[in-house]
Amino acid sequence: MPDSVTTDGVETADAADEISDAASLFVGDTGVLDIDTRRAIVRLIRGPFLDGGADEAVWAALQRNDGVVRQFLSEIFLTLVVDDAERIAFAQQGEEADVAFPKLLRRVPLTLVDSALLLFLRQQLSTVSGTGQRAIVGLDDITAQLQPYQRQGASDHSIHAKRINAAVTKMRDNGILRATSTEARFEVSPVLRILFPPEQIAALTEAYDRLGEPDAQDSGDAEDRTGTETEDTTDD
């Protein structure tokens, strides 16, 4: 029998040796994972996603100990989604089968303006798909896209502007929009391709269209999620 086996969920012997040799990191530490693997797990649980381009060491640890991380997340009812091409990973809540279990991740509620913004950003990613270019949007582009969806009968444009700014802030806080070197211009994170694959865009388009309905309420009609059940760290 070979000394090591490489399958999903089973680390190689080399990885096992590395994990077992991890030094104690704090008083009372009984863990066996190295610090970068632990950081990867924390990033995944805290959400909204782990960006491999932002931390090479943590990304390398995740890839090196993929099976160990998956097993750890399974112990707390989570699954791991990894896109190697985009170097992005996130944890999502496992689907209940016959046995109910506690939910660790909380959904991020989206207003209709949030949903409209997400759809617009996802569309911008689609326009550059396969070109190797980045999707860049300006605050003026976002404002123009969302301006027609001001609440029916509302006359205070400053209130709608505040809602747009709040939606942009939420997308920045959750890593969907990244700042660029140019003020008020942002890069759309490719994570949206994973969080909102083509089959889910139709549902989001429906929420977007409801913005034009007379009885649409900005805070209650389309509570949605960012595509993955992630810890809600935004201020709504």
Image (cartoon, rainbow, N blue to C red):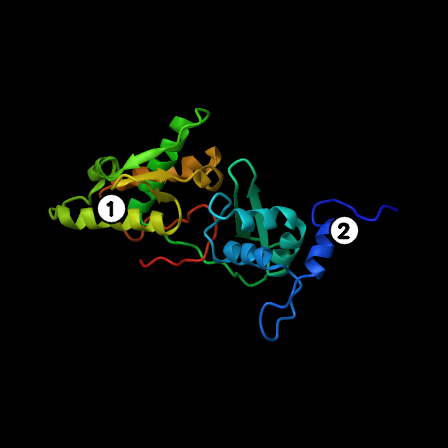
Image spot of residue 41 (x, y percent): 56, 56
Q: Nearer the viewer, mark 2 or mark 1?
A: 2
Give the distance between the C-alpha atoms of the residues marked 2 and 1, in whole angstroms: 52 Å
Question: Going 78% across and 46% down the picture, which residue do you hit?
Answer: 5
Q: Is residue 165 left or right of residue 55?
A: left
Question: Going 45% across and 45% down the picture, which residue do you hit?
Answer: 227
Q: Report the front residue among 3 and 10.
A: 3
Sequence-wise, the earlier of marks 2 and 1 is 2
Image spot of residue 175 (x, y percent): 40, 47
Residue found at the far bottom of this picture: 28
Question: Going 37% across and 38% down the picture, which residue do you hit?
Answer: 188
Q: Are marks 2 and 1 in contact (CB under 8 Å)?
A: no
How many numbered marks, from 0 up? 2
**Mark 1 residue crowding within 10 angstroms, few (<14) / some (14–19) / many (20+):** many
Residue found at the far left of this picture: 155
Image spot of residue 142 (x, y percent): 26, 38
Residue found at the far right of this picture: 1
Q: Is residue 125 left or right of residue 183?
A: right
Quadrant of the snapshot with the C terminus? bottom left
Residue 132: quarter of image: top left
Q: Of the numbered discs in the image, which one, if any, rests on residue 13?
A: 2
Residue 25: quarter of image: bottom right
Position above or below: 158 against 209: below
Secondary element type, mark 2: helix
Image spot of residue 81 (x, y percent): 56, 45
Residue 29 visible? The answer is: yes
Position above or below: 144 against 131: below
Residue under label 1, please give it: 164
Kind of residue sitting beneath label 2: Ala
Kind of residue sitting beneath label 1: Ile
Q: Report the front residue among 27 and 195.
A: 27
**Mark 2 residue crowding within 10 angstroms, few (<14) / some (14–19) / many (20+):** few
